Image (tube, rainbow, N blue to C red):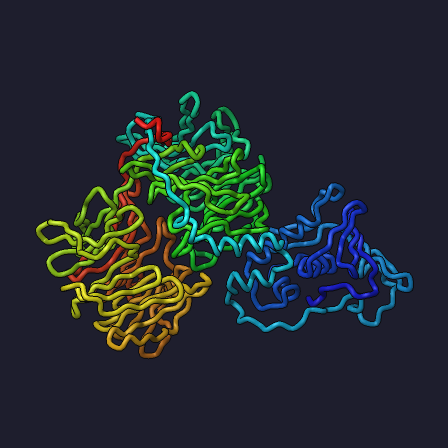
Amino acid sequence: MNEVRFSRQVKEVKFGEWVLDPKRQCISDGDTTRELEPLLFRLLCYLIINNEQIITRQDLVDDVWNQNFVDDNAINRAMSELRKILKSDKQRGIVVKTHYRKGYSFFLEPQIIYHPDQPSNTSPESNPDRTITNPLDAITREIPEQPKAQRGKRLSWLLAGAAVLGAVTLASLDVVQFNLDYANKDESVLQTLDQPIKESVLSWVQGRYTLLNLSPNDAMVAYSFIQRDTDYYSLVVKSLKSGHERRLGEQGVNYYPVGWSADSSTIYYRIVDGDKCQVWQLSADFVSGNQFLFDCKLNSMTGGGINQDRLVYAKSGYRNRDELSALTNRDLLTGEEFQITSPNLNSYGDRFLAYVPEKEIILFERRQYDINELYMTDPDGGNQVKLYESQSRIWTLNYDDKSGQLVWFDNSQNIVYSFSLDEQRLVKAQKLMTEQSYANYETLNSRELLMTSYPFVMDIYTLDIQDRILSPQIKSIREDAAAIEVPNGYLFLTRIGHLYRINFKANDGQVSALGLPDADYKTIRYNRAADELLIQYANKIEVYTLDGLTMKLAKSVNGTIVSVEYWSESEISYTVVDETKVNSKAYVLSSLDEKVRELPTQSTLWLDKINDTMLVTLSSNDILSAFDLRTGEVVHNLELPPAKYKHSVTILNGHIYHSDGESIHKIDFATESIIEPIYTVDDAKFVIDRVRSSDSGSLIVDMIEVVENQLLKVSLLETDTAI
């Protein structure tokens, strides 16, 4: 299809209550006249001309944008802006229809009106007696030639934004640019106020509380709960006024809240029974409306109702990647759904935070490898605006309609942030004066929060491959991870607030700080042959002599380092997601001359060598590949089984070991089964975070253990009233 614009013979096009004037590029319903930006004008003409068929996204890329590739977000924004423009007091029905997983179509029947000296008809093809030498005479293609991008590669957000300039208001573009300028400055410029607090326990039942989910009217909170001496989560809905609790659960099944309807009358929840996952709905009073909605994946899910019959939720498995999620708008009556966000493949994707009915906006977190971004969009996925960037996760937030502020809690620093939607900036930061660590939270307002005390302990274990016995190696009350074996003990990272400390545990059990300052370390590696300590940051690699901690090498990159390994005694392999968050590349750095060479791999997130002739890579679409280094050919490809938590891969003694968060597998391409499970944890109590190899022949395993905690209400006190 190449039909993009009506010819000069066409005077106007009528559809529904609208009349399109192609010459002036505007529409009018008699009361309202709206000018169309160039992109939206081409898009509308294209849909009208091809009104008898479904238009795919690729059709739009090829014919409207006239490029080889356009970011999905650009198409979503343009389509949303067009739908907004086509709504008026007179025109209230559907004009552009979405066909799930197929594309779009023009819903109304257009009437083509020609100039007086031209014949007229009701549609371009409806008059068989009309004589036209070329059936395409009624249209003409007037898009200037543009340089072609390589198919399959996504443009940066900046280029995609330029392509959809006509679909985004200038105000929105100003917001995006403004936020990029200030996003990393607000936290350092804003004065943080120390706030004394008062804690009160909301439930004295002993067990584990998690996944707090506050109702939009702030009257109820839903959460999952495992009572002491039981093994399965039940769903609890608690009234914050009366304290009355309603509980839903059964033996052998886990219940998890997903979200609330916009009017707080309905709770959406998940049932996980073994490998089966289902989404259900239930009236908040537990009296009626308990109804199965649809099947889901085992990964965690957040969502919320935008009206009684529509649910927007974070759906995992986007682009067939287990750890990648995108927001989806689902019609609960018909089961039809369409995706409203399109995160980059090289990210963890989008997580639903809240729906604000007063402003008809959805707020969500986009988790990149190096940063967490706060976005807002409308329920159709249009007009997406990045509001803020944070080094810490934004797990939940609430909108305070009185102040017009978004409020969330940074549980890595114990700071309550208030963000003005009108001013598009942080306006308040309040640090809780407590040593308590919190996990789940909900913000009632800028002065009151619902909390769970920290229910996790991260410790380090070793797994004996032969005996398949898991043994604790480093246990403390803090989060310990990323241990590596060094002479006479282990080095590991311990979280101190939002930073990490490198600690040393000697073979006699004594733990001491290594001596380097606390920093945002990502991981560490050890090269025994050269007695070198490698430290990975988000965008830098440093190498020290372990004895004396003298720096030998420092290498900064443009982008985010997502993995690093010692390739050989003098070479370091690492993978980088570039600044556009789109492409990932693999490199080898020589510690002798600091030269860097790029490896011919694509979409690589991790790589290491099995031996001198075989390279193994993990791609962003969860494919494990083996390369013959002598020929450069791929000799094996394996699609990893779905991750229960996240994928982690390591090489030990010439074998590949993989964890999906629940089990550790040995992978051997030479065997018929290929994948052999060698250890599985009790998923009600443990999660495997990462696996690594050790020189002693065991796997080093970072384990997250779930422990008992409390459900709390935390109130921020005025300084002069503090006790």
Q: Foreground: 637 or 220?
A: 220
Identified at 19% across, 49% down, the residue is 470
Is residue 191 visible in the rendered image? The answer is yes
Identified at 33% across, 27% down, the residue is 200
**Where is residue 41 drawn, in percent x and y?**
71, 59
Picture quadrant of residue 61 = bottom right
Is residue 609 visible in the rendered image? The answer is no
Picture quadrant of residue 114 = bottom right
Compared with 507, 274 (above or below) is above
Q: Foreground: 500 or 149?
A: 500
**Where is residue 717 drawn, in percent x and y?**
36, 30
**Where is residue 220 drawn, in percent x and y?**
45, 28
Residue lying furthest front: 720
Residue lying furthest bottom: 631
**Where is residue 37 drawn, in percent x and y?**
68, 58
Q: Is residue 557 left or right of residue 581?
A: left
Picture quadrant of residue 448 = top left
Identified at 32% across, 62% down, the residue is 563
Which of the image's four quarters has the C terminus? top left
Which of the image's four quarters has the N terminus? bottom right
- How many discs mark residues in the rendered view? 0
Residue lying furthest right: 117
Q: Is residue 17 left or right of residue 186?
A: right
Q: Is residue 105 left or right of residue 471?
A: right
Identified at 31% across, 68% down, the residue is 555
